[in-house]
Amino acid sequence: MSAELAPARSAPEVLAELRALRGADAPTRGGRTFAYVYDAALAGLDELAAAAYTEYATVNGLDMTVFPSVARLENDVVGAAAALLGAPGVQGSFTSGGTESILLAVKTARDHARAVRGVTRPQLLLPSTAHAAFHKAAGYLGLETVVVPVDPETCRADADAVAAAITDRTVLTVASAPSYPHGVVDPVAAIAAAAAERGVLCHVDACIGGWLLPYLRRAGRPVPAFDLTVPGVTSLSVDLHKYGYADKGASVVLYRDAELRRYQYFAHAGWPGYPVINPTVQGTKSAGLLAQAWAVLRHVGEDGYTALAAGVADASDRLLAGLRGIEGVRVLGDPAAGLVSFTLREGTSLLLHLADELRERGWYLQPQLSHGGLPANLHLTLTPATVGRVDLLLADLAEALAAARALPPVAVDPGVLDLAAALDPESLGPDEVAAVLAFAGLPGPGGLPSRMAPVLVLLDALPEPLQERLLAEFVGSIFRI
Ligand SMILES: Cc1ncc(COP(=O)(O)O)c(C=O)c1O
């Protein structure tokens, strides 16, 4: 579309245009994209979600007194999450995703600590593997982050180190179940106990695992206690748009009781408009996302989720066994199921060449860069659609690895690193940023290199504040208007 609205087109033409635009995207169904998408591979589920969304697309979730069915749907969905992951008295909200659930849990903790403990300079205590959304929340809400390294072998949070880092200013500690980077479950009970001893709240980020781990347990797999039944856990986030298989825009945040949830709500009477009471971040919001999540949960049901979880666990077992049998591969930590990350002993250049080679063969594995002594790795999120693909993936992976080994390694000019170390990311002008981006192989406006290894190897070697500045500029160049 040009900058102005083009002349009106017919509905079929518009839809055809949209379909054509998707041609360049990674496939969201079919089990070859191992990040970002959650495919239950259940016939009719996408159609049900779409129909339920359409039914509620025009309903405004802003005012449940005018649209009371919104309250009914939300109570059902949050009630299902509370039954699965809660304890008596648990209350929560439906939100647009993990980031919003986390933002709200952090705001709640900040406001609770100010009211109850008089904390005015709040700190958020995070294991280094906690999701970036916590850093975003801290940035938005004015908290200082205190980051504690995880165990370099197991990649799990170190409960003693977390306990030792609690101060009078700590308003929230965090444990992941599991962590996104490596799929390992943190020692939730020990972290929550340490927090409780100091009168501090503890959030469990079960965004990715909350709808999987309980069903794995039901399928007979060992799963440690990680939810709101664990003493000291005071809030928990779980995304329905991950292993709940709802469409994107569906998550739940839970609190141990109504007294805590109260700090999440925003009410405003001091203006001449309608009385505002927003439980979550958005004001006006379509009830369509809530309705589709409600429909998907009801349709799949307990037995359905259990069977899907068992399939994912079986695929993880086969993938892990296959990966561990490949010379030079190191699986990181002991993943709980669903998520798998591995690195290559031969280094980052080969690893990122491998990701490119796999992409050329139609597979997307997600590159993750090194941080704090933890190596760069490739991340896979297994979903039911990938279950039948594991053997094929492993065969292609062996071939892709051989092809990657035949490529010249990506070398980073030490002079560039010296220069980068001396740069202040904040004071870089647009021309300097453009020059670094071009050096990294990113040609600017909208241009994406066909191979990412040269870009990512350089990025991985740069100081993190500079990485952040370059990433922001790069994305700004994609959204160029
Ligand atoms: C553990 C964890 N927390 C938080 C998030 C952020 O969720 P979202 O992308 O839905 O905002 C994710 C996303 O992958 C996650 O895995």
Image (cartoon, rainbow, N blue to C red):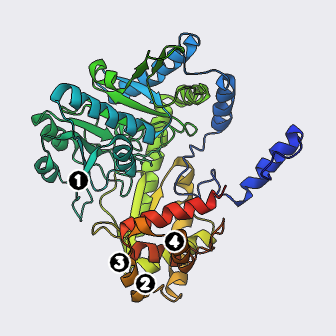
The mark found on residue 433 in the picture is 4
Q: CA distance from mark 1 to mark 4?
A: 36 Å
Q: Amino acid at mark 4?
A: Val
The mark found on residue 416 in the picture is 2
Q: In this figure, which residue is indicated by the disc labeled 1? A: 157
Which one is earlier in the sequence, the residue at label 1 or at label 3?
A: 1
Q: In this figure, which residue is indicated by the disc labeled 3? A: 421
Q: Amino acid at mark 3?
A: Ala
Q: CA distance from mark 4 to mark 2?
A: 13 Å
Position of 473 with respect to 162 (left or right) is right
Q: How many marks?
A: 4
Residue 457 appearing in the image: yes
The mark found on residue 262 in the picture is none
Which one is earlier in the sequence, the residue at label 2 or at label 3?
A: 2
Q: CA distance from mark 1 to mark 2?
A: 34 Å
Position of 334 with respect to 96 (left or right) is left
Which one is earlier in the sequence, the residue at label 1 or at label 4?
A: 1
Q: CA distance from mark 2 to mark 3?
A: 9 Å
Kindly indicate whether the residue at mark 3 contacts the one at mark 4 (C-beta within 8 angstroms): no
Q: CA distance from mark 4 to mark 3?
A: 14 Å
